[in-house]
Amino acid sequence: MLSKNQLGFLYMFLSICAFSIMDLIVKWSDNYPIGEVLFFRGFCGVIPLLFLIPKEKYSSFYKTKKPFLHFKRCLSGLIAIVAIFIALRKLPLATVTSISFAAPIFTTLLSIFLLSEKVGFYRWLAVLVGFFGIIIISEPGFNSMNIYYIYPIIFCLGLSYVAITIKQLSSTEPVWLISLYFSISIMIMSFFTIPSGWVFPNMIDLVLLSLLGLLGGLANLWLTQSYKFSDVSLVTPLKYLGLIFAIFFGYIFWSEVPSAKTLIGSALVITSSVIIFRREIYHKKQIIIPRHE
């Protein structure tokens, strides 16, 4: 039998693997419209959630006490997921993953204005280090006017607001309902892109696109289970394995070799997020960044 901490590590590892493979499929699926890919993410992402609805909630599972907060969470999540999908298709996997680690930096900044939290010297220093890392990673893009470098940053901003809204929602709303509303909102938004021309997938592509949605739903459930069984401080550092997977997949499938600037910048961004995370633990205000659900 595994201990609680070992279970926490296992669920976190499974979550990281699922997100990494999902990112791989998103990048691979660039011959399909983003709206169509979003449909599979939303539709198939609902499937794992249906098994979490308590029997006594079957007739009223959709009821919520905070509809407007759900709306804001879904809107910010939609902005984040569209941005990361575009970034994954247009930029190297390692670059996108490196910049996405900067989400805690933006969460720290947003918490000042939205939650009236006080930020001390160490977290301000971490924010500056993180932004310097982003500049180092993105500098080649700015030099060549590559607009796509802005999309991972938009993702971080959207995800940061998602983290804050989930923190507010979780006081009264179950995790499965928060995720369910988001998956349904993805599916609804995708329907508006049908006129742009969806492509009917062959059998192999259909399986892969469906797998993308299932992995997205499962990854968030495994992430939640990880935090349930183990201390956040123990399992969260494992998320940086995602960069290793991104470098590996990028090299194997697209011959992408991360530049020295990407590696140096990612090291600064990771250092920044670790400092912020440790300070959150010190102040007992752990803000969990749930990726792009």
Image (cartoon, rainbow, N blue to C red):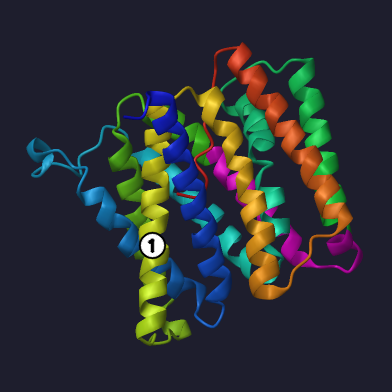
Residue 193 showing in the rendered view: yes
Please state the horizontal and vertical placement of residue 240, each as a whole percent of the image: 64, 42
Q: Nearer the viewer, residue 132 or 203?
A: 203
Q: Nearer the viewer, residue 134 or 274?
A: 274
Corner quadrant of residue 52: top left
Q: Which residue is denoted by mark 1 in the rendering?
A: 213
Instruction: Check the image and report above or below for 162 versus 95.
Output: above
Instruction: Check the image and report above or below for 121 versus 144.
Output: above
Q: Nearer the viewer, residue 226 or 176?
A: 226
Residue 154 showing in the rendered view: no
Corner quadrant of residue 120: top right
Q: Is-magenta flag for residue 145?
A: yes
**Residue most extreme to the right:** 143
Please state the horizontal and vertical placement of residue 93, each as a whole percent of the image: 67, 62
Q: Which residues are magenta?
A: 140-161
Corner quadrant of residue 160: top right
Q: Is-magenta flag for residue 13?
A: no
143 horizontally vs 257: left or right: right
Please tell me which residue is depicted at 17% across the width and 42% down the height of the picture.
Answer: 61
Please state which amino acid type lies under the numbered disc 1.
Answer: Gly
Magenta span main SS: helix
Please tell me which residue is depicted at 63% across the width and 27% down the height of the picture.
Answer: 113
Disc 1 is placed on an element classified as helix
Please state the horizontal and vertical placement of residue 292, each as a whole percent of the image: 50, 50
Please state the horizontal and vertical placement of residue 34, each as a whole percent of the image: 51, 72
Label 1 neighbour load within 10 Å: few <14, some 14-19, many 20+: many
41 horizontally vs 172: left or right: right
Please tell me which residue is depicted at 62% across the width and 33% down the height of the picture.
Answer: 107
Please tell me which residue is depicted at 58% across the width and 37% down the height of the picture.
Answer: 238
Number of callouts in the render?
A: 1
Quarter of the image with the N terminus is top left
